[in-house]
Amino acid sequence: MPPNSSPDPSAVLDPSARRASPRVRLGVGAAVALFIAAVVVAAVMSFAASGGGEQGEVGFAGNGASGAGAFGDAAATVATAAPPVVLVHVLGAVASPGIVQVDEGARVVDAIAAAGGLTAEADPAGVNLARAVADGEQLIVPKVGEVPAAGAAGDGAAAGGTGSGGAGDGKVHLNTADVAELDTLPRIGPALAQRIIDWREANGPFTSTDQLLDVAGIGDAVYSGLVDLVAL
């Protein structure tokens, strides 16, 4: 063995003598800590650049869209709100007599159209087609040659289903009276009064008082007691 290659004597004295000095160990630890910190910072920056920020923006945009949709739905509901309606009882020479529903402010012509329109026998001159209808009124369209119901010649209908006081004669008018008015007649109770109204709705306005004899339950004796108390 060459003289200059002999082992270091301190290597065999104590193994701890071969450990790195404290200054060397501190430098290595600091380098490791800096490396770990650099990795963490790089990961955070990469996440923020690629995913986190965009997700936050998408979430905000989604909330804005939801708010716009809510306001849009509310506006659509207001815009499509149904207008007020009125009910009119249309009788006489129409295709489908009965209660019809029309918009508030509608005219007599609209109510007749809702009842199927005029029949071939209808007399359009018997009603005022341009008059505005009222909620709960009764509209009677006469046939050609028929005497218009009380109040029909002037305004086209008897409002509210009554009209016995229109002529001021103190009589019950068969074409406009309701159950309560008909019930005031002798020997006419609520049931028979309703039959009179049912007959009127099915056959159109009375053209003669003696048509009361066509109503079930009214015979000659009953008719003779009320003939002087009724009118068309």
Image (cartoon, rainbow, N blue to C red):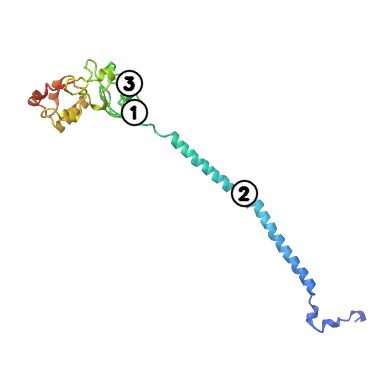
* Residue depicted at 85% across the width and 83% down the height: 9
Q: Residue flagged by tag 2: what amino acid is it?
A: Glu
What residue did someone put label 3 on?
131
Q: Earlier in the sequence, mark 2 or mark 3?
A: 2
What residue did someone put label 2 on?
54
Q: Nearer the viewer, residue 34 or 46?
A: 34
Q: Residue 117 placed where, x, y %?
A: 31, 23
Q: Residue flagged by tag 1: what amino acid is it?
A: Val
Q: Earlier in the sequence, mark 2 or mark 1?
A: 2
Above/below status of 97 relative to 23? above
What residue did someone put label 1 on?
102
Answer with the quarter of the image where residue 121 lies.
top left
Label 3 neighbour load within 10 Å: few <14, some 14-19, many 20+: some
Q: Residue 23 placed where, x, y %?
A: 79, 72
Pick the quarter of the image with the C terminus: top left
Q: Residue 207 placed where, x, y %?
A: 18, 19
Looking at the rendered structure, the secondary structure element under dot 2 is: helix
